[in-house]
Image (cartoon, rainbow, N blue to C red):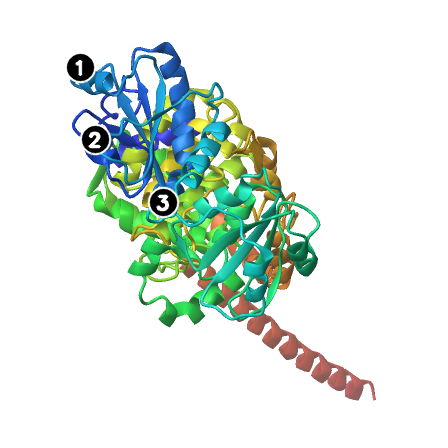
């Protein structure tokens, strides 16, 4: 199922080939800067940010093995780039021989860091530490920033030094324009400083750190466990901010999810947000993002069949086969109403019965629009987004619903493993296809079970047990690249899913680096309706808050299905609406005739009794 799904994507996305330069250790798709002899000096000299550069050689075995770690580090600290950036330079390229010699590169890899506003004559400081794992190098970057003086500190780097109780306590009860988060931690902890840098590109919240040795502050805030977050709200109130796990990733995720907190680039391009805030608030309150809404799935099918696929005048060859497989898959696995399933079944039977190798798509549209007036067949012809509704028109919507449909079908296939053998899908976004198809091609062979199919795309940022991190890194790089862009919804920013608020047990840290708990993600994606996710956090509260609404929706759906049961049976026997109308008319006429006959004979029998009685007398 899964292998065919991505073959479908490759065909319909029309990907023009794989990325060039496959032998290169780093490409422009990686979240770092590739430097050369012509750009190194101008980049690191007099820069507004500090730099950490790896000088490597593409033929060096250790460099090849370490490249994955360096890419992961660059992705982990991508939010820090306004304060300190990560770069690489390949000394094996002939054009870089002289610059590597000039910077005294004798071993590979060699790490050099450059302070902000450094002079053109500065050749950097070599990091000679033996520990080059992500957490250690990340802490080195924090130390580099903290070693700057106030005069030469990077332009956008906030203070990383701890605040005292004398500076923080006067803020209690004061109104402000944004949130203020106080992270209280042990003196040797890096969590507070890393969270400050994680929120560097966000507006609406200021993060300050304090130490556990500041007893007056601990007494005033009543903090006894470390690290902890104390939140000062704009209206002057203040409270502890609960986190299921006291880890950097959880702290950063909680602060980014606060209302009004968004990337500064989004804030600059979203001038009309305040005007629509009341409407947006209704969306975020009424919709629980861990649930799947049939309105989104129906809208996805409507747009896919009537708009996206309608750009094809005809279907032939592999495209036609892919479309047949897709329709069959939806007909077997779609969880929606019986009328939509009947439509897809009818469409599937019609496509499979055709001996033609080429069909006009208008014929498909005629069947989708039910111009033959087949009973029990219907697909709404309007877009109605619920869980995929964006904060304004043009955001989320169809891409969100298509991913949701994909995820639902993988989970349904796990629940009904014998439903079908081959599946496919259609998606017309060539840009998205160009980004994801190479990764799909690399990891198709690693997907060997239905559970791995669910993990592959059930959470937007997951893959199989062996290929999980490959897709996770690629998808997150795309999300990071698009984060803050015009296509990113400020109320639903691109981020790993499920979030910590929906499934805290899905997230862990290993050696200071965020990792996914595969088993808990699978449990979250495939759990029965209404079952709480492990470590639900705020998601559990939201689910309880909207439980009545979900129950009412389910009752309405049951009523609709029960009322349409007779229609479904007649439709399955081949009756159309005219046939059923005639049946109803004949039934009513027969009842009237029988009633008339009954009264006629009743009156005749009474008259006969009276006549026989008179003769007897």
Q: Residues within 10 Å of mark 2 (few under 14, many from 20)?
A: some
Of marks 1 and 3, the one in the foreground? 3
Helix, strand or loop at disc 1?
Answer: helix
* Of pointers 2 and 1, the one earlier in the residue sequence: 2
Q: Is residue 367 visible?
A: no
Give 308 or 161, whichever is nearer the viewer. 161
Q: Do the numbered discs 1 and 3 sit on residues whose CB atoms are within 8 Å?
A: no
Query: What residue is shown with label 1?
Result: 94
Residue 319 - label? none
Q: Quadrant of the C terminus?
A: bottom right
Identify the residue at the far right of this view. Answer: 617
Q: CA distance from mark 1 to mark 3?
A: 35 Å
Label 3: state its secondary structure: loop
Q: Quadrant of residue 250?
A: top right
* Picture coordinates of residue 88, whole percent (x, y): 30, 26
Please name the residue that numbered disc 2 is placed on.
41
Instruction: Between residue 114 and residue 494, name the one nearer to us.
Output: 114
The residue lying at 37 percent from left, 36 percent from top is 477
Per the image, label 2 sits on a secondary structure element best described as helix
Question: For mark 1, does the 10 Å Cα neighbourhood hold few (<14), some (14 to 19), or many (20 or more) residues?
Answer: few
**Which residue is label 3 attached to?**
153
């Amino acid at each position: 199922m899964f292998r065919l799904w991505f073959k479908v994507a490759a065909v319909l996305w029309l990907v023009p080939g794989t990325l060039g330069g496959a032998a290169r250790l780093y490409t422009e798709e990686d979240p770092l800067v590739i430097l050369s002899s012509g750009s190194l000096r101008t980049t690191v000299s007099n820069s507004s940010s500090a730099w950490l550069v790896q000088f490597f050689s593409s033929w060096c075995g250790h460099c090849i093995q370490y490249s994955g770690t360096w890419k992961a580090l660059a992705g982990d600290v991508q939010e820090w780039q306004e304060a300190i950036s990560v770069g690489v330079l390949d000394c094996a390229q002939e054009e870089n021989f002289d610059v590597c010699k000039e910077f005294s590169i004798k071993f590979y890899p060699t790490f050099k860091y450059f302070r902000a506003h450094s002079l053109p004559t500065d050749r950097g400081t070599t990091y000679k530490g033996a520990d080059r794992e992500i957490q250690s190098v990340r802490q080195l970057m924090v130390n580099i920033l903290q070693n700057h003086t106030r005069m030469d500190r990077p332009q956008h780097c906030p203070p990383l030094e701890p605040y005292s109780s004398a500076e923080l306590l006067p803020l209690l009860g004061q109104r402000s324009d944004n949130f203020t988060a106080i992270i209280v931690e042990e003196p040797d902890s890096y969590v507070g400083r890393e969270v400050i840098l994680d929120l560097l590109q966000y507006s609406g919240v200021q993060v300050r750190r304090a130490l556990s040795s500041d007893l007056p502050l601990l007494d005033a805030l009543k903090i006894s466990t470390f690290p902890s977050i104390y939140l000062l709200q704009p209206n002057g109130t203040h409270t502890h901010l609960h986190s299921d796990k006291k880890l950097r990733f959880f702290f950063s995720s909680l602060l980014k999810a606060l209302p009004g907190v968004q990337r500064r680039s989004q804030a600059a391009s979203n001038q009309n947000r305040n005007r629509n805030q009341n409407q947006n608030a209704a969306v975020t309150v009424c919709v629980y993002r861990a649930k799947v809404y049939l309105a989104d799935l129906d809208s996805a099918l409507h747009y896919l069949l009537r708009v996206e696929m309608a750009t094809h005048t005809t279907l032939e060859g592999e495209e036609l086969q892919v479309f047949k497989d897709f329709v069959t898959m939806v007909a077997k696995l779609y969880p929606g109403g019986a009328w939509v399933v009947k439509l897809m079944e009818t469409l599937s039977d019609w496509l499979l019965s055709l001996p033609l190798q080429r069909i006009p798509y208008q014929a498909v549209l005629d069947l989708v629009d039910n111009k033959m007036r087949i009973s029990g067949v219907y697909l709404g012809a309007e877009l109605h987004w619920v869980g995929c509704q964006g904060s304004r028109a043009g955001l989320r919507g169809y891409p969100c619903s298509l991913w949701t449909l994909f995820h639902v079908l993988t989970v349904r296939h796990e629940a009904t493993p014998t439903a079908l053998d081959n599946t496919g899908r259609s998606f017309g976004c060539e840009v998205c296809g160009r980004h994801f198809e190479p990764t799909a091609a690399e990891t198709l062979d690693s997907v060997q079970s239905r559970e791995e199919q669910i993990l592959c795309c059930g959470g937007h940022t997951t893959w199989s047990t062996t290929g999980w991190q490959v897709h996770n890194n690629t998808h997150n790089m795309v999300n990071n690249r698009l984060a803050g862009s015009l296509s990113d919804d400020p109320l639903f920013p691109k981020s790993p899913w499920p979030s910590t608020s929906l499934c805290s047990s899905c997230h862990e840290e290993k050696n200071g680096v965020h990792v996914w708990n595969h088993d808990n993600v699978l449990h979250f994606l495939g759990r029965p309706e209404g079952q709480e996710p492990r470590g639900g956090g705020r998601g559990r509260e939201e689910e309880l808050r909207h439980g009545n609404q979900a129950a009412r929706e389910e009752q309405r759906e049951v009523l609709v299905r029960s009322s349409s049961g007779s229609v479904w049976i007649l439709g399955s026997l081949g009756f159309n609406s005219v046939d059923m109308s005639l049946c109803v008319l004949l039934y009513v006429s027969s009842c009237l005739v029988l009633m008339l006959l009954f009264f006629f004979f009743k009156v005749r029998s009474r008259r006969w009794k009276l006549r026989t009685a008179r003769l007897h007398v």
